[in-house]
Image: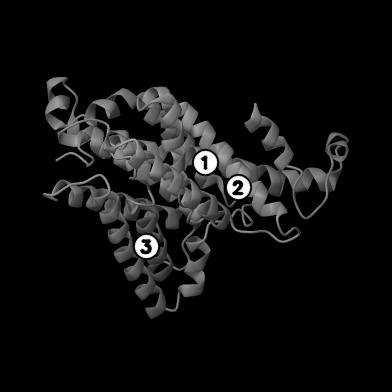
Amino acid sequence: MALVILSIVSLFIGVIDTDLGALLTGNPETVKLFLISRVPRLLAILCTGIGLSTAGLIMQQLCMNRFVSPSTGATISSAQLGILLALVFLPNSSLWGRAAFAFVAAILGTWIFVWFIQHIQFKDVVLVPLVGIMFGNVIGGITNFIAYKYEMTQALSTWLVGHFSMVLRGRYEIVYMAVPLVILAFVFANHFNIVGMGKDFSKNLGVPYNFILFMGITIAAMITASVIVVVGSVSYIGLIVPNIVAMFKGDKIRGTLIDTALFGALFVLVCDMIGRVVIMPYELPIELIIGTVGSVLFVILLLYRLKNGRKAVRFGKGGIGNGQCGA
């Protein structure tokens, strides 16, 4: 209910003043504003929150680590590199062409991260996301080098900081891909739970471990890439939202996926509304608001997890539950 109410309220927040009466009476300018800008922006916000929170939940479930997410698993950095490669080698490519590069790069980058984790002998709950952050910084360094070399820094800046100010009809529809991917994740939620218990456990239950792991990582990477192409980099959603929901709903993905998706949409919507009203008529990037709020929440969650012991972070003991992706 809160999501519905705030969604309606958000439609009337902006530089151009509008009211419900003008919309109901069919005022041409108001209707045009809603169809071209306000409604597409709202849909992009909802898809971003639903998609990134679900992607984070999938990665945490498959890696069995509460600190893994698209931002700590090098997925966002890889998608940005893919977009830059599209800008360099196919400068006249369409938004879908750039999305294709982002999809491939995000999938490859996330899989390399998983490969790293599988081949680390000493594994720890905190070490896993640290490896992802370091790997993401390496990819970010490569991205910046290429951007400077080909003088694409300014063009790349659009995807380095997430914002919804440029979301208009005809420029955001790619983010709709998050919806069928989230539905697909819900269908295979039980399989993700089983794979999260380890390779041997999966084989004993007749679940194809490698296929499900590949599919889950691919779904998370494609959701993230579709958001990056339209909105830009948005951190912390996939890290914070699943953790908050898990504190109240538990760790089973099928039982928490819907709540995680809805809370993710609500979280992004509230942050976007804050960014629009703080210095109105100007607007703060959504990345700045979520980064500020997310940093505080992350510290609180980290202290909470450490206070309640490592078992609060780990899903189980041994194998894949020992705070790392399975080998």
Q: Amino acid at mark 2?
A: Cys
Q: Tell me what residue is drawn at x 45 percent, y 74 percent.
A: 152
Q: Which mark is residue 161?
A: none
Quarter of the image where the N terminus is located:
top right
- Label pair 3/2, CB-CB below 8 angstroms: no
Give the residue pinned by disc 2. 271
Q: Amino acid at mark 1?
A: Gly
Q: Tell me what residue is drawn at x 23 percent, y 53 percent.
A: 112
Q: Tell me what residue is drawn at x 21 percent, y 34 percent.
A: 321
Quarter of the image where the C terminus is located:
top left
Q: Position of residue 4 (x, y in %)?
A: 66, 30
Q: Position of residue 170 (x, y in %)?
A: 60, 50
In the picture, measured across the screen, residue 18 lies left or right of residue 274, that is: right
Can residue 219 be seen here? The reply is: no
| Location of residue 87 (image quadrant) | bottom left
In the picture, measured across the screen, residue 190 lies left or right of residue 176, that is: left
First in sequence: mark 3 or mark 2? 3
Q: Position of residue 130 (x, y in %)?
A: 28, 55
Q: Which mark is residue 49?
A: 1
Neighbor class of circle 3 (other Cα within 10 Å; few <14, some 14-19, many 20+) is many
Nearer to us in this view, 170 or 37: 37
Give the residue pinned by disc 3. 81
Per the model, the C-alpha gap separating discs 1 and 2 is 11 Å
In this rendering, which labeled residue sits more in front, label 1 or label 2? 2
Per the model, the C-alpha gap separating discs 3 and 2 is 26 Å
Q: Amino acid at mark 3?
A: Leu
Nearer to us in this view, 23 or 17: 17
First in sequence: mark 1 or mark 2? 1
